[in-house]
Amino acid sequence: MVTPDLVLDNANIITVDPTRPRAGSVAILGDRIVGVGAAEAFEGSRRIDLRGLTVVPGFNDAHNHMQVFGGSQTKVNLSSTVVRSVEEIVAAIAERTAAAAPGVWVTGTGYDDNKLAERRHPTRQELDRVSPDNPVALYHTSGHFTVVNSAAMRLARVGEVAVPEGGIVALDADGVPNGLLEEQAQTLVGALLHPMPVADIISNIGVASDIYLSQGITSCQEAGVGGILGTKEPMEVAAYQRARASGRLRVRVTMMPSVENLHTGAHHPDDEEPFCLDLGLHSGFGDEWLKFGATKIFADGSLIGRTAAMFDDFDGEPGNSGYLQMAEETLHTLIIKAHISGWQVATHAIGDRAIASVLDAYEEAQRRHPRPDPRHRIEHCAMTRPEDVVRIARLGVIPVTQGRFISEIGDGMLRAIGDRHPNCYRQKSFLDAGVVLPGSSDRPVVDGSPLLGIRDLVNQRTAQGAPFNPHEALTAEQAIHAYTYASAYAAFDEGKKGSLAVGKLADLTVLDRDPTAVDPTSIADTRVLATMVGGSFEFDQAGFRS
């Protein structure tokens, strides 16, 4: 073996490599791992004694909204840790409006009507009381609702222009818009706030990168480049490229372009009609820092928002079983066209009816145009019937679920689905069926720290302490596997990262304790001491760089 640049020694290394599950030393040359073995197994140009600290592969969030999360740091924080009632939301907006110049937009994010004392959304009238002239937009934590005031409604001509397919403008008892925009109706206001300047997007990416590294994240998958649900960003890929060139993108990103950015193109008569980005670009193009992954398609909405497409009505709401965001035929056509053109397809489907429909489309696409290992994904895959677990396994589909939802929004989900909760956010059922299960957060919908996600996958408890689905609980080892190897697999990257093995990228995280050896309820107390990307400590609270 050539002499390594660096040897991390005297460590408790959880490799996530079945051929050597634990090790004591890892040798690194450049950005690659060149040796994994027992303590003091390697000599190198530099040696760091980790004093028994635990090392895991760098965490990989398989479904997040990185630049939106970065941007959320400048909006009014309306999360349940800060506000607990509509009146507190109104007070927070009043304070921000008082400091804003006339006519400037005031935006807030992260409110959850399920956690407010009133158990409802704010209204435009309440926002008008404190911001009659500044337009206001409040983003629900799920991303599936926006509340606006009258000034914003006037600018967006809400009530005058047609409501986009797959969206609803909510009305009050008098039949007048009350300020709540559901699903695709958010595009009415989104068009006024997007696109953003590229410089702002780069700043958002940089802010998110710094936070991710502090939480042990070395890779993430950006679920909707180009904009989703009213956030059109036609220059977002350029922003990621420039962020990488300038050093502000500090973690590896797989970009999932929204299907709205795909189009048919000129082609030779002998070729299938392409459905792609310009010049035929599709999944896989790029490098180890920035590449295209799946294309993102929306099938339905939200569980806590009760807009997901279900076979049966939501609890306590007769007649409301949610809805698809487009005609089912259109959805299937998009999926099949993307499959034919070489895309991995990632479809947002939460309700059991939406999931069943997406599986129908994936099966039909593969029947018509067989392709080896397409690894199509279902993002969220929340309400999954037993028979669809079997179909997911048979088709090789990847369910990209969010264990973090269990604690942070689990109480609201339980209220929405009642006695159907055993089908909700399955974990162990997928593993038992032989399905690869990634770890993800959907940040900024919830706090996306992987250690919180690992805790929730293991403990299956809501924020109020209620058991969610104890029969779906994972072991700590299985949860770490989800956030490392399985997430890499979901992006066709398992040959490069996701485990600590010879030839793989030197992406790893140093923890102050072993999450597999502590009381499961205390997993989230684990601290990230250092995060290495490509052989370099990019976050270093332990002083390893000195």
Image (spheres, helix red, strand yellow):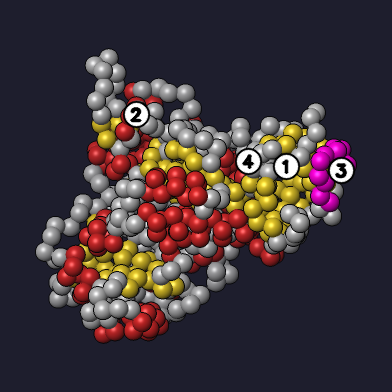
Real-space CA distance between mark 3 and mark 1, rounded to the nearest whole angstrom:
14 Å
Magenta highlight range: 40-49
Q: Nearer the viewer, mark 3 or mark 1?
A: 3
Amino acid carrying label 2: it is Gly
Name the N-terminal-most of marks 3 and 1: 1
Q: Is residue 504 magenta?
A: no
Q: Nearer the viewer, residue 275 or 213?
A: 213
Give the total number of marks visible in the rendering: 4
Per the rendering, the mark at residue 15 is: 1
- Residues at marks 3 and 2, CA–CA distance in whole angstroms: 49 Å
Secondary element at image label 2: helix
Q: Which residue is mark 3?
A: 39
The residue depicted at 74 percent of the width and 49 percent of the height is 55
Amino acid type, callout 1: Thr
Cα distance in 3D space between marks 3 and 4: 22 Å
Q: Earlier in the sequence, mark 3 or mark 4?
A: 3
The kind of residue on which mark 4 rests is Gly
Q: Which residue is mark 2?
A: 280
What amino acid is at disc 3? Ala
Q: Quadrant of the C terminus?
A: bottom right
